[in-house]
Image (spheres, rainbow, N blue to C red):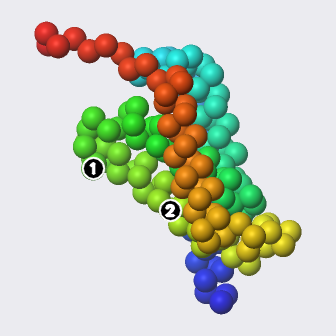
Amino acid sequence: MDEMNLAMLILRVGIGLTFAAHGYGKLFQGGRISGTAGWFDSMGMKPGKLHAWLAALTEMGAGLLLALGFLTPLAAAGMVGVMVVAGWTVHRHNGFMIVREGWEYTFVLAVVAVVVATMGPLEWSVDHGLGIAEDWDGYIGLAIAGGGGVLAALTQLLVFYRPPKTDDNG
């Protein structure tokens, strides 16, 4: 069982810290929140500043929670929600492969998050230390992460996403 715990710890920490780094970048690197807000506005996620803050904080929070194995299905749901919105608003027009700016990367992160929530964080996690890991894994983790994350994303897209008009004349 130690091999499974080690493998899950490596997966949670690797994916979680990668996701948190995306949020960190939105807050502290490049164009920061104002640059991210402008980009979000330009793609139709209005108001851009609100969504820049929500994306940055969700990415940092969900990533760190997943790395710790703390409230794992909720962290995974946050990851799924952000990745579904990103896949739809930014990447869907470019096909699947990331080399063409497609939605491959967002899909893989969302799938990994759902798998972690379904399997549970295992023994080397805060959830296990609190005695809640087994209460939230399996189909419950799947429903929270997959269903909850997709539902949150769809709600956000329906309420806020207004894609810019394209000029069909070239």
User: x, y (%) of residue 125?
Assistant: 75, 70
Mark 1 residue crowding within 10 angstroms, few (<14) / some (14–19) / many (20+): few
Residue 75 higher or lower than 43, as above or below: below
Q: CA distance from mark 2 to mark 1?
A: 17 Å
Residue 20 visible to an observer of this rendering: no
Q: Is residue 65 left or right of residue 20?
A: right
Q: Identify the mark nearer the N-term, 2 or 1.
A: 1
Q: Residue 73's mark? A: none
Q: Is residue 54 left or right of residue 104?
A: right
Front-most of 30 and 1?
Answer: 1
Image quarter where the C terminus lies is top left
Front-most of 160 and 23?
Answer: 160
Q: Residue 112's mark? A: 2
User: x, y (%) of residue 102?
Assistant: 31, 43
Foreground disc of the pair 2, 1 = 2
Q: Is residue 96 left or right of residue 145?
A: left
Classify residue 14 by image quadrant.
bottom right
Q: Residue at x 55, y 43 (%)?
A: 151
Q: Residue at x 25, y 43 (%)?
A: 95
- Amino acid at pointer 1: Met
Classify residue 89 by image quadrant.
top left
User: x, y (%) of residue 15?
Assistant: 56, 59
Mark 2 residue crowding within 10 angstroms, few (<14) / some (14–19) / many (20+): some
Residue 153 visible to an observer of this rendering: yes
- Amino acid at pointer 2: Val
Q: For mark 1, what is the residue?
A: 97
Front-most of 116 and 12?
Answer: 116
